[in-house]
Image (cartoon, rainbow, N blue to C red):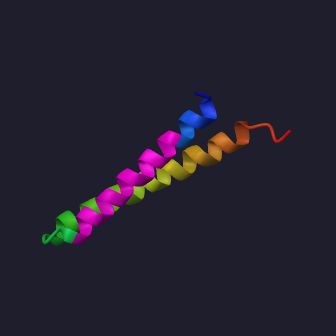
Amino acid sequence: MSVAGESGSRAQQMRDQAQKLEQAAERATDPAERQRLKDKARRILDQNKMENERGSRDVDPM
């Protein structure tokens, strides 16, 4: 598998993980736990975005 394919797969895994955390946050009854889960999901998405931006600079358009 190519490096781009591996990073794409990792990006999808990170998005899936963040979505699961968001869903868990919606089910959480404790407000502190809900916020912790939402914060963790947001950090994962932010990290994913940074990795995607960094990776896109490494790709030659032609």
Give yes or no for residue 16 being in the magenta stretch: yes
Residue 53, x across and y down, in percent: 63, 48
Placement of 60 over or under 45, stated as above or below: above
Question: On the picture, is 37 further left or further right than 7?
Answer: left
Farthest left residue?
Answer: 30
Q: In which quarter of the image is residue 28?
A: bottom left
The N terminus sits in image quarter? top right
The C terminus sits in image quarter? top right
Question: On the picture, is 44 further left or further right than 62?
Answer: left
Q: Nearer the viewer, residue 57 or 27?
A: 27
Residue 54, x across and y down, in percent: 63, 42
Placement of 30 over or under 42, stated as above or below: below
Q: Which residue is drawn at 46% across and 55% down?
A: 45
Placement of 7 over or under 2, stated as above or below: below
Q: Give the range drawn in magenta.
A: 9-26
Q: In which quarter of the image is residue 31?
A: bottom left
Residue 5, x across and y down, in percent: 59, 36
Placement of 15 over or under 33, stated as above or below: above
Q: Main secondary structure of the magenta part?
A: helix
Question: On the picture, is 3 further left or further right than 45?
Answer: right
Q: Quadrant of residue 55?
A: top right
Q: Residue at x 82, y 42 (%)?
A: 61
Q: Nearer the viewer, residue 16 or 25?
A: 16
Q: Nearer the viewer, residue 46 or 60?
A: 60
Give yes or no for residue 56 being in the magenta stretch: no
Q: Which residue is drawn at 50% across and 49% down?
A: 48
